[in-house]
Amino acid sequence: MRTLGCPLLLAAALAAVPAPADTAFPQYSLLIDVPGYNLEGGVVAPLWPLADWLGAEVQDADRWAVVVRGEAVVYVQLPQAAWSGAMAVMPLRVVAEGVGAQVRYHGAASEIGAQLGHIPTVEIKLGDRRALVVVHGAPPPLVAEVIGAVGDETLGTGWLLQVSAVAGEYVKTHEPQWDEPFGFGQRYVTGVLLRRNAEWLYLLRSTKVSHTRAELADAGIPPEVAAQLGIEIED
């Protein structure tokens, strides 16, 4: 199970995130191996890495999964749009709460969301441990590909990556910049990556809110793709 970045930097960044009043454990782990995705009105996440963090065992996983932690047993049917293999997904809240964890969704405009660069997350509390799962705008297998392509060495020391939109072979990322030692500041980078064969390559990383058609052309991003990704085009 990977968490995000250097523990010392992570603690510095998240020290500013207010913990709920009922806990004395304000620190979190950011679970980059558990990319959340909003499917059919609920957040789903990859089955095995989430169960691993929960300290649970997956006894079976086909169209149904049996998740066991101590005396707690949860039978859950995988969503119809489930992905196979290591990226089979499960409803996060159903399983986490079923094995005794507390779950809370934090929108992009929430206090925690704002501290993490206006990114929606799901908070999981189990005993004295807390974790945050980023809710992406792309399915977990695609998120895993992009995160693997950009390299772990940058995570936790430069930015927190969210894959926020998809248009064919292009993806847009939202990358809040690290403002050490105070956590994530108000500077953001918009990235656009393109899948070429088996690789993901950056076409654009920019702090600008909008871009001219000439800038997009220089980056190799067609205007119709930019529009699908929600990039503002200057006329």
Image: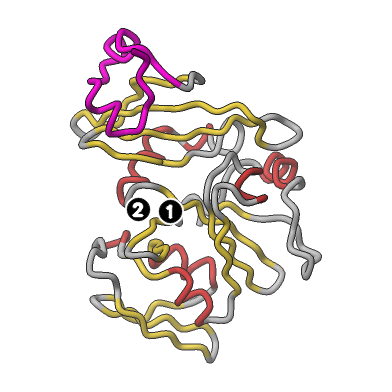
Residue 224, quarter of picture: top left
Q: Is label 1 in contact with label 2 (beta carbons under 8 Å)?
A: yes
Viewer-proximal residue among 106 and 54: 106
Q: Position of residue 151 (x, y in %)?
A: 44, 34
Scheme by which the image is coloured: secondary structure
Q: Tell me which amino acid carries mark 1.
A: Pro
Disc number for residue 178: none
Which residue shows up at 51% across the image and 33% down it?
A: 175
- In this rendering, is residue 94 above or below 8? below
Which residue shows up at 36% across the image and 39% down it?
A: 146
Which residue shows up at 25% across the image and 21% down it?
A: 223
Viewer-proximal residue among 189 and 45: 189
Which residue shows up at 52% across the image and 56% down it?
A: 133
Q: Position of residue 63 (x, y in %)?
A: 24, 76
- Left-right relation of 232 to 10: left
| Magenta stretch bounds | 210-235
Tag 1 secondary structure: loop
- Give yes or no for residue 132 being in the magenta stretch: no
Q: Tell me which amino acid carries mark 2.
A: Pro
Q: Position of residue 47 (x, y in %)?
A: 38, 67
Residue under numbered circle 1: 35
- Left-right relation of 132 to 198: right
Tag 2 secondary structure: helix
- Left-right relation of 231 to 54: left
Residue 147, quarter of picture: top left
In the displayed orientation, state which residue is furthest to the front.
235
Residue under numbered circle 2: 140
Q: Residues within 10 Å of mark 2 (few under 14, many from 20)?
A: many
- Left-right relation of 201 to 3: left
Task: Measure the alpha-carbon separation of dots 1 and 2.
Answer: 5 Å
Q: Position of residue 185 (x, y in %)?
A: 67, 31
Q: How many marks?
A: 2
